[in-house]
Amino acid sequence: MDTPRYWIAAVAQASAITGIAGGFAEVGYGKAGPLERMRAGDFFAVYSPRTAWPEGEPLQAFTAIGRVRTGIVYRAAGGAGPGPFRIDVDYYPAAPAPIRPLIDALSFIRNKAHWGAVFRFGFVKVPPGDFALIASAMGCPLPVEDPQPG
């Protein structure tokens, strides 16, 4: 198996809850592109800036964490038109973790004063150590694998 990679998507908490209940991830308003970067065995977390989109209460917390099951991206059954793209994720039991206490320790956030900018595209690959820190803050310590040198 390939070394897993670690991803975070910016998704409202209400959408994260729907994903957890259904065992899937849906990001970027249902776009396939970000999901196609993930593969089976990768780890996935959700950062929720708000409780709901677009006018939910500010939350600024990690709200879901899991592992990509098959890596197959598929289109969900929609109403009148094509549904959003999804990928299956096995979510772990975890508690929401506010981001603010973690900002200084997260290496993928280079500009600590404007930390939210890292999520502006809605999907980001992060180092294993950062992901482990987030998982621990969520009460879900995960074994992370550091990439092999070279």
Image (cartoon, rainbow, N blue to C red):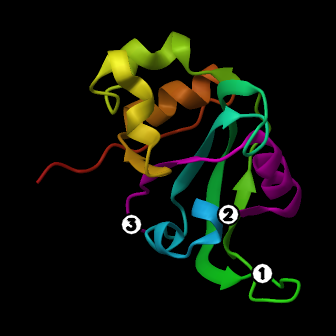
Compare residues 110 and 21 and report the one nearer the observer. 110
Disc 3 marks which amino acid? Asp
Q: Position of residue 58 (x, y in %)?
A: 70, 25
Residue bearing mark 2: 26
In the rendered image, is residue 27 in sight? no
Q: Could you tell me how many numbered marks the image carries?
A: 3
Q: CA distance from mark 1 to mark 3?
A: 27 Å
Q: Would you place residue 65 above or below residue 29 in this image?
A: above
* Region of the chain picked out in magenta, as a range: 1-25
Q: Would you place residue 38 above or below residue 83 in this image?
A: above
- Estimate how packed mark 1 is, as few (under 14), some (14 to 19) or many (20 or more) residues with alpha carbons within 10 Å: some
Which residue is at 43% across, 69% downward? 37
- Estimate how packed mark 3 is, as few (under 14), some (14 to 19) or many (20 or more) residues with alpha carbons within 10 Å: few
For the C terminus, the image quarter is bottom left
The label on residue 76 is: 1
Disc 1 marks which amino acid? Ala
**SS at badge 3:** loop
- Estimate how packed mark 2 is, as few (under 14), some (14 to 19) or many (20 or more) residues with alpha carbons within 10 Å: many
Compare residues 69 and 31 and report the one nearer the observer. 31
Q: Are marks 2 and 1 in contact (CB under 8 Å)?
A: yes
Tell me if residue 115 is in the magenta stretch: no
**SS at badge 1:** loop
Residue bearing mark 3: 2
In the rendered image, is residue 85 in sight? yes
Residue 24 lies in what quarter of the image?
Answer: bottom right
Q: Of all residues shown, which one is farthest toward the left? A: 150
Residue 107 lies in what quarter of the image?
Answer: top left
Q: Position of residue 136 (x, y in %)?
A: 59, 24
Which residue is at 57% across, 61% downward? 28
